Amino acid sequence: MNELIEGLRQRLGERVLTDEAVRAAHRRDTWVMGELADLEERLGDPPLAVVEPESTAEVADVLRDCRAARIPVITYGGGSGVCGGVRTDGCEVVLSTRRLEGLVELDARDATARFRAGTNGLAAEKRVQQDGFTIGHWPQSIELACVGGLVATRSAGQYSTGYGNIEDMLLALEVVLPDGSVVRTRSTPRASAGPDLRQLFLGSEGTLGVITEAAFSLRPLPEASRGQAFHFPDLSAGLEAIRRCVQTGWTPPVVRLYDAIESGRQFAEWGGEERAFLLLLHEGPAARVELELREVAALCEAAGGVAAGAAAVDDWLERRNHVPGFRTFLEKGIVVDTIEVAATWSRVEALYEQTVASLNQVDGILTASAHSSHSYRSGTNLYFTFAARPEDPTRLAEIYRECWRRTMEATLACGGGIAHHHGIGRVRRDFLAAELGRGGVGLLRSVKHALDPAGLFNPGVLIPDGD
Amino acid sequence: MNELIEGLRQRLGERVLTDEAVRAAHRRDTWVMGELADLEERLGDPPLAVVEPESTAEVADVLRDCRAARIPVITYGGGSGVCGGVRTDGCEVVLSTRRLEGLVELDARDATARFRAGTNGLAAEKRVQQDGFTIGHWPQSIELACVGGLVATRSAGQYSTGYGNIEDMLLALEVVLPDGSVVRTRSTPRASAGPDLRQLFLGSEGTLGVITEAAFSLRPLPEASRGQAFHFPDLSAGLEAIRRCVQTGWTPPVVRLYDAIESGRQFAEWGGEERAFLLLLHEGPAARVELELREVAALCEAAGGVAAGAAAVDDWLERRNHVPGFRTFLEKGIVVDTIEVAATWSRVEALYEQTVASLNQVDGILTASAHSSHSYRSGTNLYFTFAARPEDPTRLAEIYRECWRRTMEATLACGGGIAHHHGIGRVRRDFLAAELGRGGVGLLRSVKHALDPAGLFNPGVLIPDGD
């Protein structure tokens, strides 16, 4: 162990950090169960060291050294993951990407920008905006996450219905594999020379290598940006409106439909009380935005929607990333979390009904609700929120797991997909086999074993243990 | 060998075909070098047998039997590939997907359709049109290719600028792996439970398993469909017009720009003589099509375009899939082929100039030209066409290889991608390492070895031999 740390020090000098506070700060991500363990002082031991390579070559060196010493490597980006993708147990090296930072290249003609993986998401967006572009990727974690982490977890942003998810924006990737070799995909408009190798790392959550650079295909900032809102008698009517819009070919960047519980909580002053509430943001050439506003409004009204104040959209834009931390609730004996799943249109209503009904059976449940925030021609996601306060506060973790289990089981029973954009991490790992099937899990394990035969990359995350 | 055939007969009965004519008909795809070898009577020996499984379970049985006997398996779909993806050498089993045919399920609410892999591309499109939908995928090979082959080769259709490529339409996939296990991805709107496993098979060209079913996300047939055309002083001006349109957010399904040589050949009567010629087809809600026609016209005119007859678009729609066979030319001592590559906007003009200049140095070259037919925010493809008639007709293959080598080298030198949508097959295999880099090829080989350790699946295709 000491030999490994000494070797790393010879390569990285003071960027091998072993002091207690730094190591302790890298024990976990933002998963509520990590927060709870922290609060209850039962979090795992900190890593052996935190290393901060400054170049791709240094990343490769670190990986080779760790592999030779058979020491696990956990890649740490912004630490904003909410599924337990980072959790140390005293025996790992944490590879922080924080010094792999900044813009590498921006090409205004191609509308492309390449960033080092540790670049903060909002910093990247602001940097391209200086040149008149947008990445168009607005996850709620944008102020915390880094671009490498957004790729590694298959992030989706709030503007995804029009602009796509992270995989739709990604132009090229540089990754260091567990054996220290470097894969640098070509910056061409379409990947079409064999299988798209970028896709192995989109969603790999640190289990297949370390992302060191990501290049994105940008959009010029839109000429116009306008919001509108509608309320609907119920969630079904709102879902039907979205389905018609998206299938007709209208895909505003932001399409968010809240159930009656959430709209009562957030949009009561705009008519959201006891109704479903739909927020839309339209962007693009001004004339098209005008037309889209009108045509989408007509489709919404035909589906039972009633126009509400567009001010609701401005209000949402203002407060969209302000969420209370889990800790505040935990300290009151309440466990809160969100669970995003997805399903085709014909399955999504049953999925909503069954999941909410099942969550409401949990001991101490306070609320169970959902909104849809990412739509596709074939279906949409549901983003459930639950809160529970068990009478016995030592049962928080147990109740939490029950809420997850019920949501995953209802989703699988309804034919939905168990994840939409937070990733698998630890919280969904036991459900992945049901999602991918025996063949799919076997395939994933084969790929993992081929790249990381000793299982040293983020062990315990994503890939379920063998049968 | 006989034991294997006997075993297969016990499973598939008369669907194990060993008669000379059937075996001979499965020796190759539509690659011009296959055609030439055929003409010159130096094609490899036919396969041991052609098998026609009727179910996924039968495919799995065939693969297990072949693996146990260590006999290579070549999957044969429509036979329309043009890169040498199918070529037998006397020792293989050809697995034909022709009896894995037809629609499995169409869901009108979800706008999704699932087909068995051997379903003809045009038959699939016609089937969904009966219910008011379109797949929106129109490769030139649509009358010949099957849906499994379109996925396995990462096909792009003529409507791709608006509707995307095959990977953008694919909802779910069923694949039998070399070990006989079945991967069936979930029909959810977005793949986000770990790496997107479908992507391993998109572009795998029969080297990683056999695709047995493919489900697509459809579009309702558009309310309106209207064409317009422009001529430009030169290719650069036309490329600039496309770049501005696509980056502004206008993505008509069809965007095709021909250089002066091709437009003189095809669009002379509409003003294409000695100019670049741009064809556009706009589809969608009628009011948006009207608006898009106007706004795109304004962008084209600002970039130096002059409106030409919209009739040119109708003419193209009519004759777009009528191409003369290679054989007609070969019999006259002329070798003709097309080579599609891609590059970002800032690289594509140099790529065009250098490739055409290089091709024009080839002995006996008759013509070298290109058009762009698939555009993206970051760049576009170039679809080169060349024809050469060497003085010595025995040099046809040599001259052909030289044209390919020059185009691949110019593309790589200009920073382009060596393939856009025909695949790698045998014709590009020696250039794949330069495209993917040492790390990328290593990664592809690792995945291949993990799934097909004995190298029995379509050997000689896609993946270059070891260093």
Image (cartoon, coloured by chain):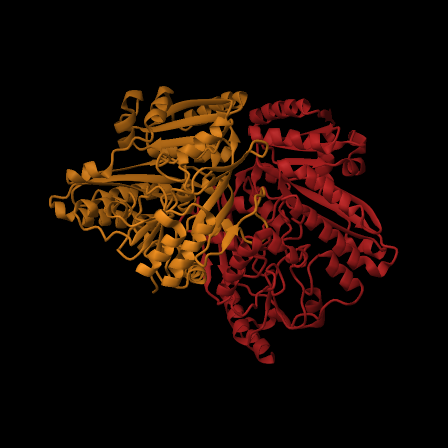
Chain colours: A orange, B red
Quadrant where the image shows the N terminus of chain B: bottom right
Locate residue B139, reporting x and y percent.
64, 46
Query: How many numbered marks appear?
Result: 0
Which image quadrant is residue A453 in? Answer: bottom left
Quadrant where the image shows the C terminus of chain B: bottom right
Q: Nearer the viewer, residue A341 or B284?
A: A341
Locate residue B53, reporting x and y percent.
56, 65
Q: Nearer the viewer, residue B150 or A325?
A: A325
Residue A403 appears in view:
no
Task: Tell me if B236 is positioned left or right of A211 in this view.
Answer: right
Locate residue B427, reporting x and y percent.
68, 57
Residue A355 appears in view:
yes
Identify the residue shown where x is 56% and y is 41%: B164
Locate residue B330, reporting x and y percent.
82, 56
- Give the residue at the far bottom of this rendering: B3
Q: Nearer the viewer, residue B137 or A234?
A: B137
Q: Nearer the viewer, residue B93 or A53?
A: A53
- Give the residue at the far right of this rendering: B391
Task: Tell me if A279 is positioned left or right of B440 in this view.
Answer: left
